[in-house]
Image: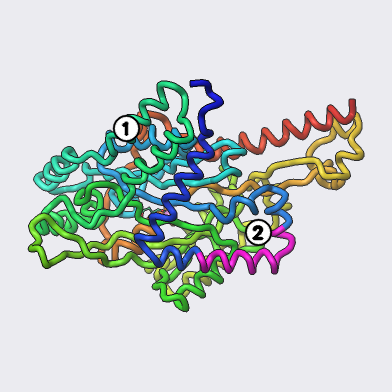
Amino acid sequence: HHSSHFVSSDEIRSRFSRAMSTMYRQEVPQYGTLVELVTDINARTLQAQPALRAQMERTGEAARLGVERHGAIRVGTAAELAMLRRLFALMGMEPVGYYDLSVAGVPVHSTAFRPVSDSALLANPFRVFTSLLRLDLIADQALRAKASAILAQRNIFTPRALELIAHSEAVGGLTTAEADEFVHEALETFRWHQEATVDAATHDALQKAHRLIADVVCFKGPHINHLTPRTLDIDAAQAAMPERGMDAKDVVEGPPRRDCPILLRQTSFKALKEAVRFTDDAADSTGAHTARFGEIEQRGVALTRKGRALYDELLAQVRDMGNAGNAAPDYGLRLAQVFEQFPETHDALRAQDLAFYRYSLTAQGEAEADVALAQADLATLLAQGLVQAEPITYEDFLPVSAAGIFQSNLGSEEQKQYQAQAAQQAFEADLGAPVHDEIALYAAAQQRSIDQLRAALRDQAA
Ligand code: OOG
Ligand code: NI
């Protein structure tokens, strides 16, 4: 093979994300309804906000908006996680960030597989939030041993998917026909299976230890549990969900509504109760399992370490104010009040080094570039209208929000306490690679834009 015969990883990711979306629409029809709702709201929002529209067109994000999705899966073993890393690598998706959810009473830790380069993110930012079950957090020894024995029996990948992964690694890529076959085979890992691999009593016992444990251990594979479109107005979408028959979660996770959105806001509709067949079910009877749901998200600017520390501090303040957490009726009010301390404009966020931006020459900047300008600092160039700053979109997740999304789908009775124990090194050993530091990725993206800008100014001045 010559490398030009290979399909790009961007193209494989786009084909895969499209195939996943088609499959999930068939599996969970309400997902289709949610995508239609978000499409309508995005069209209306872009029409009502010409500045937002212009910004999204300049940055190239308008083109990706319609295909932008994230999904989530939960796996049971280190071997499953490590193979997923290799599978996602074929699609240009790398592990970014480490999320310890044990603090929030969920016995998993996680990463997000996603593209990392500027061009790959623009082509299709498909992300999969991937959690590894922590069997060490099951207190009952016998149950823990049983869960691990069940997991050791299963193979979540098709033989052909494994062959194609090894083949691509060996020769450096896949042809277009192989890529189609790979997408088809890889999709099998994420499919829902109505047949559980255990009897009803085992499902019950695992469910009692934690509902999440049952969801991971009792099935053939890590069914995709939600697929999330990106909305430009999450409050409008949240308000419209009941009209379209969706049982929305009470509060939107993340920061409050703002004129210049930061990080990520998310809401979901509750998990569906689905019929499943346990191995000992009579031919005409079924059991039930709830796991799969729908979610929407609104993305804002990525924050620097300083900005993120301020966000975490303010969120903790809000959550400490009432012991009912975000279930309290005045939560929205408290959130809005406390976040008045977070600067409201992009100019202020930039001046205080709280958020990341991509810098480029304006038309005026291109026309007026000279030797003096090539040496001026960024603040001066911005003030003179020669340079523009576009917010860098946050491409990742938030642990407190993720915990809220998990909880809303596990039922309110599920409030287990685990000791906070981040174990990033153990996670990376299981994954077989380190995870990227997401903030370092944003800092590098900002710096690349500044380097390009400086080079352009020097070229023009010369
Ligand atoms: C993942 C929940 C986290 C998000 O968007 O924060 C998540 C799960 O339920 O498996 O998807
Ligand atoms: Ni999600």
The circle on residue 260 is 2
Expressed as whole percent of the image width and height from the top left, the position of residue 10 reads 53, 38
Expressed as whole percent of the image width and height from the top left, the position of residue 351 reads 72, 47
Q: Main secondary structure of the magenta part?
A: helix
For the residue pair 125 and 186, the one nearer the viewer reads as 186
Q: Earlier in the sequence, mark 2 or mark 1?
A: 1
- Could you tell me the amino acid type at mark 2? Cys
- Label 2: which secondary element: loop
- Label 1: which secondary element: helix
Residue 182 lies in what quarter of the image? top left
**In the rendered image, is residue 87 in sight?**
yes
Look at 59% across and 50% down and name the residue there.
Answer: 64
- Could you tell me the amino acid type at mark 1? Leu
Residue 192 lies in what quarter of the image? bottom left
Expressed as whole percent of the image width and height from the top left, the position of residue 177 reads 44, 35
Reading the image, the residue beneath label 1 is 162
For the residue pair 309 and 398, the one nearer the viewer reads as 398
For the residue pair 454 and 335, the one nearer the viewer reads as 454
Expressed as whole percent of the image width and height from the top left, the position of residue 455 reads 78, 29
Residue 406 lies in what quarter of the image? bottom left
Provide the residue span drawn in magenta: 36-53
Left or right, 272 with reference to 434 = left
Look at 51% across and 44% down and name the residue there.
Answer: 14
State which mark lies toward you, 2 or 1.
1
Magenta region includes residue 211: no
